[in-house]
Image: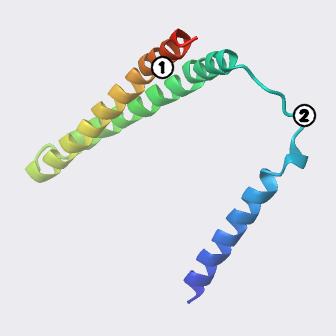
Amino acid sequence: MIRKIKEKYLQIMSYAMMIVLTNPILARAAVTPVEAESFNTKLLDIASKYLTPLGGTIILFAVVFGGIKLLMSAYSPEKRKETMGGLGYVVVGAILVGGAMFFAGVFLGLGQSFK
């Protein structure tokens, strides 16, 4: 019962916070129109400066954690199989992080070709 009340309270507070934070009065300056080209380049700059290194760091920690887990489960075939399955997800994540900038460049190039 108390758990349901806490969940409902959390939902209401989250909704209220979303309404308060998206209120236009809280904007620091007037909202100005932005050209699509400058927005795309800014978005790519943010992704290349912050998101790609963050993704690489997370993948590094996941590989190290998986390696340690694999060492710890060296004599148990079931645990080793489970750990190897988890490392497969890390490889898929690495491919997604590595391909993100490639696909962003492709989409940016397609957008500029429609001028």
Asked if residue 7 lies left or right of residue 24, the reply is left
Q: Quadrant of the C terminus?
A: top right
- In the foreground, 26 or 48: 26
- Residue drawn where x is 33% and y is 26% of the image: 95
* Residue 13 in picture, x, y percent from top left: 72, 68
- Residues marked 2 and 1 touching at CB (< 8 Å): no
Q: How far apart in space, not on screen, are marks 2 and 1 (Cα)?
A: 29 Å
Q: Nearer the viewer, residue 30 or 14?
A: 30
- Residue 12's place in the image compared with 63, above or below, is below
Crowd around label 1: few <14 · some 14–19 · many ≥20 (10 Å)? few
Labelled disc at residue 107: 1
Residue at 8% in and 49% down: 77
Disc 2 target residue: 30
Task: Give the answer, above or below, for where 104 lies relative to 16.
Answer: above
Kind of element beneath mark 2: loop
Residue 85 image point, x, y percent: 20, 43
Q: Amino acid at mark 2?
A: Ala
Secondary element at tag 1: helix
Q: Position of residue 9 (x, y in %)?
A: 67, 76
Q: Residue 70 falls in which quadrant of the image?
A: top left
Name the kind of residue labelled 1 in the image. Answer: Phe
Query: Quarter of the image containing the N terminus?
Result: bottom right
Residue 8's disc number: none
Which colour scheme appears in the figure? rainbow
